[in-house]
Amino acid sequence: MNILLVGVDKRDDLTRKEQNLLHLGRQDGQRTDTMMVIHLSEDHRKVTVVSLPRDTWLDIPGKGEHKINSAYQFGGPKLAVQTVQQATGLRINHYIAVNVLGFIDVVEALGGITVCTPVAIDDNKTKLKLAAGTHQLNGVNALHYARTRATGRADLDRIDRQQQVISALLAKAISGDTLTNPAKFGALVNSTLRTLTVDDALSEDFLGLATQLKDVSTDNVSFVTVPLADVNYRTGTGESAVLWDKAAARDLFHRINTDQPLVPPVKPSKSPTATPSPTAATIAPNRIAIRVRNGTLITGLGARTKSALLAAGFLVPSVPGDTATRTYKNTIIRYGPTRADSVRTVAAAFPGAELRQVDIDGIEVILGAKNHTVRKPVTSTPKPTPTTASTPTTKTATQNICK
């Protein structure tokens, strides 16, 4: 299932007081500051969020070449959906729009969020001033944080912040038991639905869809931005825009559409993979969900390990099971290609265990006769990895959350 999510910059229905409070100005009409495609895997166990840069220069059906955010202004939701379908090759099944007040309401409903900015922000337009570091934001400041372009990469930095905000909202909902408490969950969905514009088909079963996703962890939500070939494109009309890397974008959307890993999996070497040291752990345990299976004949090992993992701060949502063969000598940690960061923390919890990258979702620990004792890992902040403009940058919600 593919859902087009747009952030609508609609100001003419705001009061003068609201416009002044939010520092939005008084332009009439509707624009889209944010466009994302949310892809739900067929088994509804994974969510992929693709950010479409608002300055993307492409063909809008019936209107010629314009920036992608013009589609909504020209023809509302219908033309926005047509434009995204034509550009991505994905069939858009549903549509959700959130305006500025709706965004604020969602943040406030969760009691605010925690964000961290690597650089200072001083935005004269929104009056947002943040020093580099971690900050607690209410709904209004979260809106300004998600909208500001007052940093070096302008809209591309804003995409990173918007992905971080969504991750923070998800983390807040999980940490506050909102998704597992039926009363809290129903109240959040109902209040959220009142602040959104949703297509008719989705509005009829919005709670049902949300219920199916309530067990998704931050490890299973991935963010990616369309790979770009030119971030400083100058259009024939003199506008500054960006161009997609067509080949890389086509491959990315094919992978998304067919529920493949966003990046091709790395073939494991024939020699055993070295286990990272505890200091190599970069993701906090409370952001990592683990499946546990007992590969030995030791009675109760799975249950005891789950308890130890929970005590160490990990998430273990399911009951431990047994492997078909109960003769595993060493503990094995199996992980999917997008879990390279999280698995370092798990490896630090099982010193001496063997790591195996395989084509699975998430992380699974098969307990062996040795190296099954859980140790509390020590996490550290990872160094950023440089990427080129055309490289799809992929992060999970876990990696986006402030450590």
Image: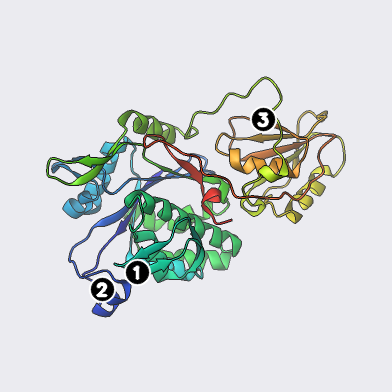
Q: Are marks 1 and 2 in contact (CB under 8 Å)?
A: yes
Q: Which residue is mark 2?
A: 14
Q: Amino acid at mark 3?
A: Arg
Q: Amino acid at mark 1?
A: Leu
Residue density around tag 1, few if under 14, some if 14–19, many if 20 or more, within 10 Å: some
Q: Residue at coordinates 76% horizontally, 56% vertically from top-left?
A: 311
Residue sitting farthest toward the top: 270
The mark that comes first in sequence, 3 or 1, is: 1
Question: Residue 101, labelled with which disc?
Answer: 1
The mark that comes first in sequence, 3 or 2, is: 2
Q: Which residue is mark 3?
A: 356
The mark that comes first in sequence, 1 or 2, is: 2
Residue sitting farthest toward the right: 298
Residue 218, position as x, y percentages in the image = 55, 50
Residue closer to the observer: 394 or 307:
394
Q: Residue at coordinates 33% horizontally, 43% vertically from top-left?
A: 92
Q: Amino acid at mark 2?
A: Leu
* Quarter residue 344 falls in: top right
Considering the image in quadrants, where does the N terminus appear?
top left
Vertical side of 89 occupied by 182: above or below: below
Residue 60, position as x, y percentages in the image = 19, 42
Q: Is residue 357 left or right of residue 229?
A: right
Q: Is residue 217 left or right of residue 76?
A: right
Residue closer to the observer: 67 or 359:
67
